[in-house]
Image (spheres, rainbow, N blue to C red):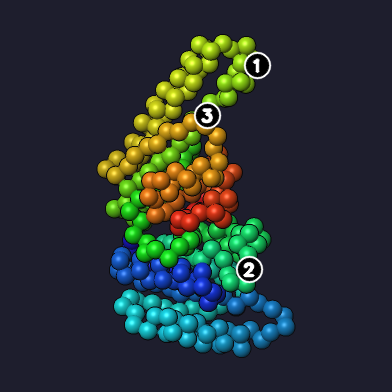
Amino acid sequence: MKNRIAVATDFSKKSLMALTKAIYLAKKFQCPLDVLHIVEYSIFHNPKKDKKAGKEALAKFIEDNFPNLEIEMRQFCYVGTIHKEINKHIKEYECQILCVGATGETQHLTDILLGSVTKQIIKKSSIPVLVAKNESLPDYINIFSPTDFSDSSTKIAKIAKRIFPEAHLIFYHMINRPFEIRLGHYGADDEQITNFNQNAENKAKEIAKKFLKNFQGSKKEMILDSGILSYTRLLSVAESKNASLIALPTSGKISFFALDVLENSKIDVLIWKF
């Protein structure tokens, strides 16, 4: 990791968790860290006074929580629209990854994600967004990457691997096969249904083998599952594999469950809308 890390804070408990992880990563990868605080613009406030108060609050927040920093850190306070100011900064300073908390203290998780400041940050960000979901140190030894073999799921897995090169990639694919009862309605007998399902499994194995060639030299494995794809299933498998990070694509079949995974995951999520 050569470029700098950015982390956004609103001084909430969740954003403190994100800042703690960002500091850990900056120290681990020996790269600089930019801490951003955005004061939302209001016609009823004086922008200069808001910015001055925001800078003072940010400095106090960092000093109170991290009095003995051992990394290169810069503090920035902007007045404006949150996601716009963040995106302007990460483009200007060529940040590689943005860390955020799942929510602020004054809003419910559903409100912030579906309303939403965090959703807008993810939607507008020009770099991958790491959403902190727990207080564990972000070693990210096992990265869980659900895939439909699309370009989007390939890209997010490659990004995760580039940022965390020592990680073990755990790919998960749900085989697309109709229910037996549905095939039966079309006149298929038991043997035909069995053959159909076997062919679907064989095809998935062939595609999976080709897909894994995109990650030559990486520690990796592929899990092929069958059944109904859902966010609860994804999270269950991720937890059973001791994943510490979920690399989540935002297009293809997996995208239908992206917000549900983001809301309900106890595991940190790396997400980027291409």
Residue 261 in view: yes
Residue 107, labelled with which disc? Answer: 2
Kindly identify the amino acid type of the residue bearing the numbered disc 3.
Answer: Asn
Q: Which of marks 2 and 1 is nearer the N terminus?
A: 2
Density class for disc 3 (Cα within 10 Å; few <14, some 14-19, many ≥20) is: some
Q: Mark 1 points at which residue?
A: 185
Q: Where is residue 154 in the image (x, y as percent from the top left)?
A: 43, 42
Instruction: Give whichever of discs 3 and 2 has the lower sequence position.
Output: 2
Q: Where is residue 66 in the image (x, y as percent from the top left)?
A: 39, 80
Are the residues tagged 3 and 1 within 8 Å (C-beta)? no
The 10 Å Cα crowd at callout 1, few under 14, some 14 to 19, many 20 or more, is few
* Identity of the residue drawn at 43% across and 49% down: 239
Mark 3 and mark 2 in contact? Answer it, CB < 8 Å. Answer: no
Q: In this view, does 242 lie to the left or right of 50?
A: left
Image: 217 above or below 227 = below
Query: In the picture, residue 104 is in which quadrant?
Result: bottom right
Residue 41 is labelled as none
Q: Say what secondary structure mark 2 lies in.
A: loop
* Label 1 SS: helix
The quadrant of the rendering that contains the N terminus is: bottom left
Q: Distance between the residues labelled 2 and 1?
A: 48 Å
**Residue shown at 60% from the left, 78% from the top:** 39
Q: Quadrant of residue 78?
A: bottom right
Amino acid type shown at disc 1: His
Local SS, label 3 = loop
Q: Residue 176 carries which label?
A: 3
- The residue positioned 53% from the left and 79% from the top of the image is 77
Q: What residue type is labelled 2?
A: Gln
User: In the current view of this chain or complex, which residue is farthest to the left?
Assistant: 217
Foreground mark, 3 or 2, reads 2
